[in-house]
Amino acid sequence: MPAMMKAAVFVEPGRIEIVDKRIPDVGPNDALVRITTTTICGTDVHILKGEYPVAKGLTIGHEPVGVIEKLGSAVQGYSEGQRVIAGAICPNFNSYAAQDGAPSQDGSYLVPMGLCGCHGYKATAGWRFGNLIDGTQAEYVLVPDAQANLAPIPDGLSDEQVLMCPDIMSTGFKGAENANIRIGDTVVVFAQGPIGLCATAGARLLGASTIITVDGNDHRLGISKKMGADVTLNFNNCDVVDEIMKLTGGRGADSSIEALGTQATFESALRVLKPGGTLSSLGVYSSDLKIPLSAFAAGLGDHTIRTALCPGGKERMRRLMNVVASGRIDLGVMVTHQYRLENIAAAYDLFAHQRDGVLKIAIKP
């Protein structure tokens, strides 16, 4: 095995470059995974723009699909050469948060942003790849606590079919799970990017009978129909809050899911709720949110607002791959482009500017 590898690292806001890095040593609880496919996430774009601080020189990316190259001495039940994925969030399940039922918050501490050249603090939660440790946009990635996080890929599933599981599918489904969806509910999903599309699919699987999706891109709204949307609304063509109130007979939606991370979408998601409804927030916000008095019913509306971080761990990954293998949804259609790792700067430019109908890009080292 070579001593060096290619990796995409954060250099400064606006610059991610391919550099040579030493392949990491494998500790007893680790696994070295040779990446066969990874992808770019909206959070990576926040990092590129400097909106979410990480250390200079850190390898970016948090969605690994690959093959076990080397196992730590304490890792059992796996074999070298085995195809695996690992969740974007990789908990060790030993923390207070994990044992209290919130494994995504495993190791959630306030880390000084000064380590990243910024001021203040950021909550890290269980997100380590491409945040606190080197990530997956490289030829190899070191998976910590491999016993808890490696999930074997079922025979017959391609890299592209499981590429959404580590983050996008897990996050989108968690948004639907957090929305308290019951059979027969009306659910509105704001934004039909990759995470919003997965939230739409999750709402359908959980039993929503009327799913309304909102976006400004007709192509994405068309794909949302395939994911389970019953009604699609382009916000360029109508006042979506008024339209949703008409569609629900003035009652409001049982649940709304906000999958973009802006003040406008958050506010709209709150305004369409019925009294007692649930807003499930999935967006990564880069500025303070304001809650309008009327939308919040002055605090008297019995509303629930829930946030989410993508669940990780091998059991979560196993369940998601079971859904893919069952054929109930096909997320492979979301992989619209492929790039080699050495061309990742061009892939970032395409993804960040949302050109050419891009949804997700398969990055192949």
Image (cartoon, grey):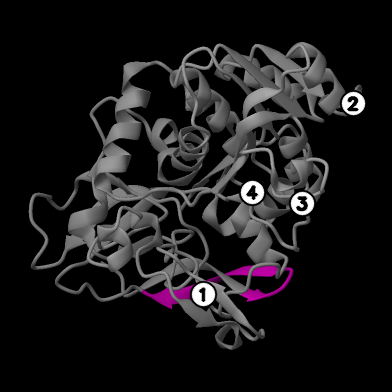
Of the pair 163 and 21, the residue shown nearer to us:
163
Q: Which of marks 3 and 4 is in front?
A: 3
- Amino acid of disc 4: Gly
Measuring 43% from the left and 64% from the top, which residue is drawn there? 129
Give the structural element (helix, strand or loop) at label 1.
loop
Which residue does the numbered mark 2 point to in the structure image?
239
Which residue does the numbered mark 4 point to in the structure image?
283
Measuring 8% from the left and 68% from the top, which residue is drawn there? 73
- Sequence order check: which comes first, mark 1 or mark 4? 1
Which residue does the numbered mark 3 point to in the structure image?
291
- Would residue 144 be found to the left or right of residue 182 on screen? left
Give the quarter of the image for residue 103.
Answer: bottom left
Residue 216 x %, y %: 82, 30
Give the quarter of the image for residue 15.
Answer: bottom right
Residue 363 x %, y %: 52, 48
Determine whether label 2 and label 3 are within 8 Å by CB: no
In the image, residue 311 lies in the stretch drawn in magenta: no
Q: Which residue occupies the extreme front position in the image?
A: 300
- The circle drawn on residue 248 is none
Of the pair 114 and 60, the residue shown nearer to us:
114
Mark-to-mark CA distance, 3 and 1: 35 Å
